[in-house]
Structures are given as C-alpha cells and as structure tokens.
Amino acid sequence: MVSAKVLGSAQRSENLRRSWYKFSRNRLSLIGLFTVSLVVFLAVFAPVVAPYPQHASAFVDFENASRPPCRTYPFGTDVVGRDIMSRIFFGFRFSLMMGVVVLSLVVPPGVILGLVAGYYQGTWVDTVIMRTTDIFLAVPPLVLALAIASVLTPNLFNAMLAVSLMWWPWYCRLVYGLASTLRHEFFVASAETIGASRFHILFREILPNCISPIFTKMSLDMGWVILIGSSLSFVGLGVQPPRPGLGTMVADGSKYLPDQWWIAVFPALAIVLVVLGFNLLGDGLRDMLGAEEV
C-alpha cells in the first residue's frame, strides 16, 4: 500500500506543476520573472559583472568625465568620470536591500495586528487597532515617509525606517478583511468548540488561509517600496553619496539635462526596470495562487 506521506508528496508535486503551468501561460509574468532574476543576479554579483567596480565608491577620473555612451562606457560616465553602468549594478543592491528589509519589518506586525483585529471584530481591540490603521492610511505614503525621514539623519537605514513606519497599515487592512471573513467559517468554530487556544486559532487555522494574498502583495509591494526609497534618495533623504543609490544618481544627473542626458536617463530606466519587473511578477503570482485583489 502507498503511504500517506508518499501520496501527500505526489499531491504537492502535482499542485506545483499546475501552478507553474498557470504561471507560465502568462508571457508578461515570465518577463517579470526574468527581469527580477536579472536584477538580483546583477546586484549579487555586481563586483564581478560590473566593468569598473571601483567606480561604485569615492572615485575620480576627470580625463573620462562626462563621456557619452560608447564602447568603453556603454552607459557613459558622470561629471567626475565614474562609469554609470557599474554604479547602476551596485545601485540595484541598495534598492533590493530597501525592499527586503522594509517588508521584513512591516509584514509581521501588520499581519499580527490584522489577525487580532479581525478575530475580535466588533470589540474595543478591533476599534483601537483599525482606527490607528485608518489614521496612517489617511496620509499619502510618500508624504508620510518624507515627513518621517526629514526629522532623521539622512541615510539608508533611516530611509528604511521611515518607509517601514508608513507601510504596515496596508498589511493590517488586508489581513483584517480576510480574518473577519474566516472567523465565521466552520473550521474556526470547530477549533473553538474543542477548546483550542486563541494562539492556535489565529496562527494555525486562520493565518494559513491568508498566506497567498499576503505573499502576492509582498511581491507587488517590492516595486513600490523600491520606488518610494528611490524618491527619498532623489530628495537627499536616502542613500548618500558616494554610494550609488539609483534615486541619488537621477537627482545628480538632472542638473545636467538635456546636454548630458545619459547621467540621469539610465539610472531612471533602471528604476523603471526594477519596478516593472516586480509588478509583472506579482501579477503572475496573483493569478497563479488565485489570490484576491490586493
């Protein structure tokens, strides 16, 4: 006889195959997956694949300053002679770091607060958590991030902190809506009947049924978090020179438009590439997992 373990493994393999088939039928999703994979590869192996890795730090070469795109410098050089392509590859590192760290900080508290508020819907716990969430959601995200970052020392860590403080309410609101519906399902009532603890009900019964929408939103939010982080760097509140933040590079290059257009255009296109890649990948994951609109 075939054991239950073998049957379970076969079922998981079949579900994975079906999910990949559904994902692969969407060409835009495959483009997003390829784009994100390329960006991650360039960020991780930047010291190896970058033509001039030393240009990612304090470096000056006035003999090659402000050179337009050519065979030696495919994306041109900036006003102090640094290779823009190499700096973009290293800039991907800071952008991905921003997205990963921010989501790692905001998802756990947002999910926990949403679970608690949804399960205790209609009580004072629900009122306190959700009214606090509504206050944060009432302020435009970029405006709130700028306000927080402006009172802190301008650097990458404080930029991450500023974005984190304004991003958790979105996960709280998402999980609150899911938990409010799931708390009335029969499997939750059954767990309550047999005396299961509140912790078990929240994290073993309700949370697993929220994973797909949460994971889909995380993939979509990566692009938006990177865009917000680049906006903070653009106004001088994020990555500080000589570090090659993409937003910082666009801000520096904008001073020399339109004559030296390549200094600002290529970093801006890099931001577009990252954001577009994560958005296309997130749309594909949403279709594959059958998640609700987030």
Image (tube, rainbow, N blue to C red):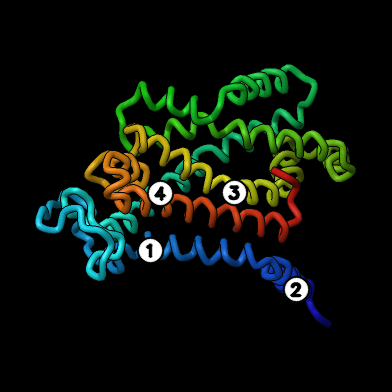
Q: List x then y, in percent, for residue 20.
A: 68, 69
Q: Is residue 276 visible?
A: yes
The numbered mark, 3 or 2, whose residue comes first in the sequence reads 2
Q: Amino acid at mark 3?
A: Leu
Disc 1 to disc 4, C-alpha distance? 17 Å
Question: Quadrant location of the N terminus?
Answer: bottom right
Q: Where does residue 228 sit, x and y in percent of width and height?
A: 47, 38
Circle on res. 42: 1
What x and y, as percent, mark residue 156? 34, 39
Residue at image coords 23%, 51%: 78
Q: Quadrant of residue 283?
A: bottom right
Q: Nearer the viewer, mark 4 or mark 3?
A: 4
Judging by the rendered image, the residue that carries numbered circle 2 is 14
Q: Nearer the viewer, mark 2 or mark 1?
A: 1
Q: Which residue is label 4 attached to?
A: 268
Q: Earlier in the sequence, mark 3 or mark 1?
A: 1
Q: Amino acid at mark 1?
A: Leu
Real-space Cα separation, disc 2 to disc 1, in angstroms: 33 Å
Of circles 1 and 4, which is in front? 4
Q: Nearer the viewer, residue 96 or 205?
A: 96
Labels 4 and 3: the sequence-earlier one: 3
- Report helix, strand or loop for mark 4: helix
Q: Residue reaching furthest front?
A: 259
